[in-house]
């Protein structure tokens, strides 16, 4: 494993993963994975990680890590996604928002699987980028978007101060078992 490329995962994501039963045998999707901070930190011998992103140069930095499959794909295109419905035990989305396809992300989660979503929210424009409302979640937007198929296990919308001050929205959603 190449250890030259170090990344730090979201501490919030790491804490939420610890709350999941049987965390060692998960099929995980790191959606819009960027530099792979979650893929790399979660990769172990029992987990299968799929990292998808538009930037092939970023994916190249960690595609040789054991148990990480990389897919270079523009998630905002009209082409068919190379991901299957109900395929993943856990889908992680951080710092990414593309409303026209946000519900499709939920379709990737297996029944009883989880969606962890953490990105910028309205109010962040006062502290830095992004400032464009197209990339800022509205209050309770994640709950409203996924409420028909998911149970909300955790929700936060507000200001945080890690290395910088930001306004974010965080949500842990668990996909319900279909009644049909």
Image (cartoon, rainbow, N blue to C red):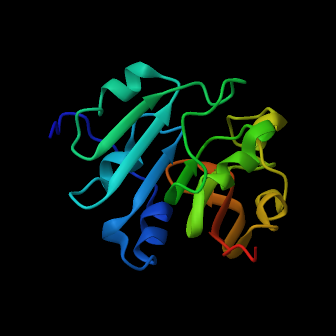
Image point (39%, 63%), residue name: 26
Residue 172, image quadrant = bottom right
Q: Quadrant of the N terminus?
A: top left
Q: Is residue 45 left or right of residue 118?
A: left
Image point (62%, 59%), residue name: 160
Residue lying furthest top in this view?
Answer: 57
Q: Is residue 109 above or below residue 98?
A: below
Image point (39%, 26%), residue name: 58
Residue 34 or residue 88, whichever sits in front: 88
Q: Is residue 17 above or below residue 55?
A: below
Q: Is residue 40 above or below residue 79?
A: below
Residue 143 or residue 120, whichever sits in front: 143
- In percent of width and height, residue 74 lies at 59, 24
- In percent of width and height, residue 111 lies at 60, 69
Q: Is residue 147 above or below residue 22?
A: above
Q: Is residue 25 left or right of residue 19?
A: left
Res. 114 visible in picture = yes
- In percent of width and height, residue 9 lies at 40, 52
Give the tally of numbered discs: 0
Q: Is residue 23 left or right of residue 152?
A: left
Q: Is residue 63 left or right of residue 84?
A: left
- In percent of width and height, residue 15 lies at 44, 70
Residue 52 or residue 107, whichever sits in front: 107
Image point (71%, 74%), residue name: 152
Res. 8 visible in picture = no
Q: Quadrant of the C terminus?
A: bottom right
């Amino acid at each position: 494993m190449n250890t030259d490329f170090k990344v730090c995962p979201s501490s919030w994501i790491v804490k939420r993963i610890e709350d999941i039963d049987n965390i060692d045998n998960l099929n995980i999707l790191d959606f819009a994975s960027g530099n792979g901070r979650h893929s790399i930190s979660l990769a172990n011998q029992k987990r299968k990680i799929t990292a998808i992103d538009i930037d092939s140069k970023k994916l190249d930095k960690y595609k040789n890590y054991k148990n990480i499959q990389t897919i270079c794909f523009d998630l905002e295109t009209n082409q068919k996604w190379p991901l299957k419905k109900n395929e993943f035990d856990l889908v992680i989305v951080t710092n990414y928002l593309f409303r026209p396809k946000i519900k499709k992300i939920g379709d990737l989660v297996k029944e009883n699987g989880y969606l962890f979503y953490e990105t910028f929210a309205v109010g962040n424009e006062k502290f830095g980028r992004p400032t464009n409302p197209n990339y800022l979640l509205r209050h309770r937007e994640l709950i409203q978007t996924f409420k028909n198929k998911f149970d909300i296990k955790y929700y936060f919308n507000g200001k945080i101060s890690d290395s910088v001050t930001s306004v974010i929205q965080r949500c842990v959603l668990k996909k319900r078992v279909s009644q049909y």
